Image (cartoon, rainbow, N blue to C red):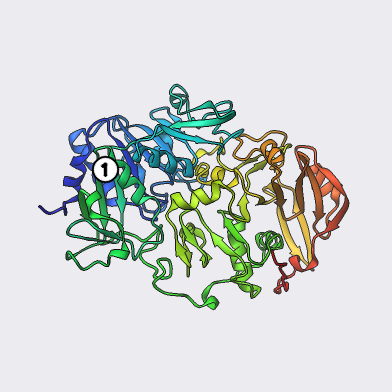
Amino acid sequence: MTKVLTAIDAVRLVPDNAIVAVNSSSGLCCPDSVLEALGARFDSEGAPRNLTTIHPIAAGDMFGTKGVDHIAKPGMLSRIIGGSYPSGPTNAEPPMIWQMITANQVKAYNVPSGVLFDILREGAAKRPGVLTKVGMQTFVDPDLEGCAMNDAARAEPIVTKREFDGEEWLYFKAIAPDIAIIRATTADERGNLTFEQEGAYLGAMEMALAARNSGGKVIAQVKRVAKNGTLRPHDVRVPGILVDAIVVAPEQLQTTATAYDPAISGELIRPLDTFNTAEFNIGKVIARRVAQELKTGWAVNIGFGVSANVPRILVEEGLHGAVTWMIEQGAVGGVPLLDFKFGCAANAEAFVASPHQFSYFQAGGFDASLLSFLEVGQDGSVNVSRLSSVPHRTAGAGGFVDITSRARKIVFSGNFNAGAKMRLEDGRLVIDKEGKVAKFVDKVDQVSFSGARAKEQGQEVTYVTERCVICLRDGRLVVTEIARGLDLQKDVLEQAATQLHVADNIREMSAELFLPEPMGLRMANA
């Protein structure tokens, strides 16, 4: 019997009340055709109803791949557990999933991406659940918000605290999905899956195992079907014994707004001179200063925002390869990409399954992480996951909490405040108009990273802005450097909405940062 089905026939495998795991990262690996058919089936048949969906990383985006929005329908979706969610411009209409969340039409949870993969792996092995320190003293902690995104979710807690072996842990029950919806490039007639044109594997194998071991079904969307016996066994990432249905979608996008780029899938190595250097502006100044925190030989995680430009700084400075970049979707090495392609890397050295990448991150095995901030609290805590006035502007925490939980060195970056009008002139920063929204505040809206826990663990934490560099020292925010041309009192201390301390030996930020020419960056050995 053939495993190749139409999308609408495949989604008839999904029963009412099912737990459905979806392997995706925005548009990357998103099985959008299957999700579209699932939503269409509900519209025409009123089934399946009362679904729970699990998305370790967001399914879909606001830029052409609807993903979870295909099934964000009252009556169809009753609970969603996501590491992240589709996000986009403030002035755009919120995705349907966000409209459901804010209207309490669905129980919604934001669980760290790595923890969600752990929950599925424990479900696959029929173990009871996950004991973890990831998320302690953050919004994940039940003493704060317990991952709940709305009142509907708060009524049904997903995480508790447990004592084990003399220590306190966060405990998440394992989840065994009834359905796994995954995506690959090629399937043979037996359902063996290869990922040759994908930019990541994410958690495809883990989701398939979790569904199969619980007696569930696995639906795989692919671009094409090959004859049995023609796929090399080393290329098969999910074996056909785990796959129940194959849906062919020849036009599936490789990632958000990208039909196909062979450098993303490692099929072509791009010359370094094809990567655009960052425009000389305030963001580049910040990225340059972040780059000065790095050492040759380090393995460095990188996140979305200003810090995503740091790899381009190293390319421009002739230092590509001095550090190895790592992103949560699974790419190791190469040049992490920007904008719609964020989450992918060109010229990667390896692709690691996301659950393994997160095991590396959660244990702090890497050297440094470069991340962004929305707000910084007086104790050094950081919010990246919630903007209450415009919820869909942020994607939630994603892998941020996993990455920062034990990272030895973290460099957060962003503008000092929001809305300021600034320019660079003659190697100096000039502020023409002050911003109205402070980003250094007494208390952040949501604790995505705990400054108090960082102090307990002895983590090295730095905050780089265009105006100054701030370090977390003994639980206090201490200004250690100031931009050329600024007045410390007027332009820094008075523009923060919380107390900033000043180092005895405060320095001026390097003059080269504020000039358009390459700055001759030198990196010490690790």
Q: Is residue 507 visible?
A: yes
Q: Residue at x 23, y 54 (%)?
A: 240
Q: Position of residue 413 (x, y in %)?
A: 66, 52
Q: Position of residue 41 (x, y in %)?
A: 21, 40
Residue 379 quadrant: top right
State how many labels appear: 1
Q: Residue furthest left?
A: 1
**436 sits left or right of 323 in the view:** right
* Mark 1 surroundings within 10 Å by alpha-carbon count, few (fewer than 14), some (14 through 19), many (20 or more): many
Q: Position of residue 494 (x, y in %)?
A: 81, 42
Q: Quadrant of the C terminus?
A: bottom right
**279 sits left or right of 500 in the view:** left
* Secondary-structure class at tag 1: helix
Q: Nearer the viewer, residue 142 or 53?
A: 142
Q: Nearer the viewer, residue 62 or 286?
A: 286
Q: Residue furthest top?
A: 155
Above or below 476: residue 30: below
Three-letter amino acid code at disc 1?
Arg
Q: Residue at x 37, y 35 (%)?
A: 175
Q: Is residue 278 visible?
A: no
Q: Nearer the viewer, residue 376 or 112?
A: 112
Q: Position of residue 321 (x, y in %)?
A: 59, 70
- Residue hosting label 1: 212
Q: Residue furthest right?
A: 504
Above or below 111: residue 284: below
